[in-house]
Image (tube, helix red, strand yellow):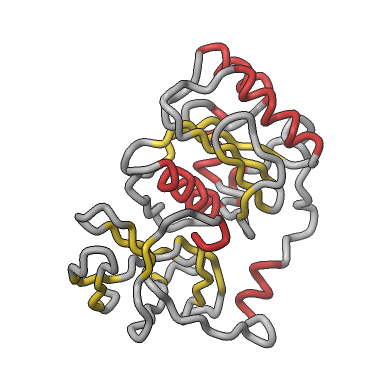
Amino acid sequence: MAESVPVRCPACLREHLYAAPSYPCACGAPVSPSLDQRATATAVTHRVWDEQWVTVRCTACGRRDQWPHPELGCPCGTVLRIPVTRSAPDTQPTAAQATDTQPPPGTAKLPAALRTPRPRSTARPRRAFQPVTIRTARDAVTAAALYLRWLGYQDIRRADQRPPSGVGLAARGVLAQVDPTVSPASPRDIECLWLTAMTESSDCVYFSLAGYEDEARVRADTLGIPLFVLDLTGTPQPVNSPADDLDATGV
């Protein structure tokens, strides 16, 4: 369990005891950001995408992944960004990292509409997904990003093209749309995501907090797009067959 550190709110001067959350590394070991006890927590007044993530190195396998930057909500209404220590990058990847970043022969990704189904017998055992409770739109994006990483996608970042609604996420071989609004996703939302993914020769995945219109689900089934609903626990729930397959096997 991560060590608790004292944190003082700069707005109301109230003191809190904070422990950084743990996240599951791909190797199965828990990782936690290292908190900087010498630095002072700052109030979050506006959000910048790059500042919402921190690189954490797994002490078990040496792998470096990006996880949500530690934050704490003070009862006075201030959101505090907890300072973390920044370690220097490794001069060369570890054997575990090198193995993980080498895709096996013959697994180059094709657009979803052109790809043939993969044999299900090759799926590797995975640890259970560790969700993040959804209280805000940012939490929904974080939950989707964590889930994509759990599926096996790497280098998750904000997508270059902004979708008509919600937030776009991109990783190697996939484009995802996260819709944290209270309106069900429409057929147009599904089609726009699919067309954008086709131009980038990648697969696509849709995450919605409010679900999908009936026609949108039919359109997604026709195009082979996995649809997920984000429940408030932060666990994406598959709502069609492509999503069931992706959830079961990962990438």
Q: Can you say whether 47 is above or below 210 in the image?
A: below
Residue drawn at (49%, 54%), measured in percent from left and top?
A: 47
Residues 178 and 65: in front is 178
- The picture places residue 188, in percent across and down from the top left corner, at 64, 19
The answer to whether residue 156 is left or right of residue 26 is right
Residues 52 and 246: in front is 52
Residue farthest toward the front in the current orientation of the protein = 11
- The picture places residue 92, in percent across and down from the top left corner, at 69, 85
Q: Can you say whether 147 is above or below 239 in the image?
A: below
Residue farthest toward the top in the current orientation of the protein = 215
Residue 244 seen in render: no
Residue drawn at (61%, 17%), measured in percent from left and top?
A: 187
Residue drawn at (36%, 62%), measured in percent from left and top?
A: 71
Residue drawn at (55%, 68%), measured in percent from left and top?
A: 65
Residues 71 and 106: in front is 71
Quadrant (top left, top right, bottom left, bottom right) of the N terminus: bottom left
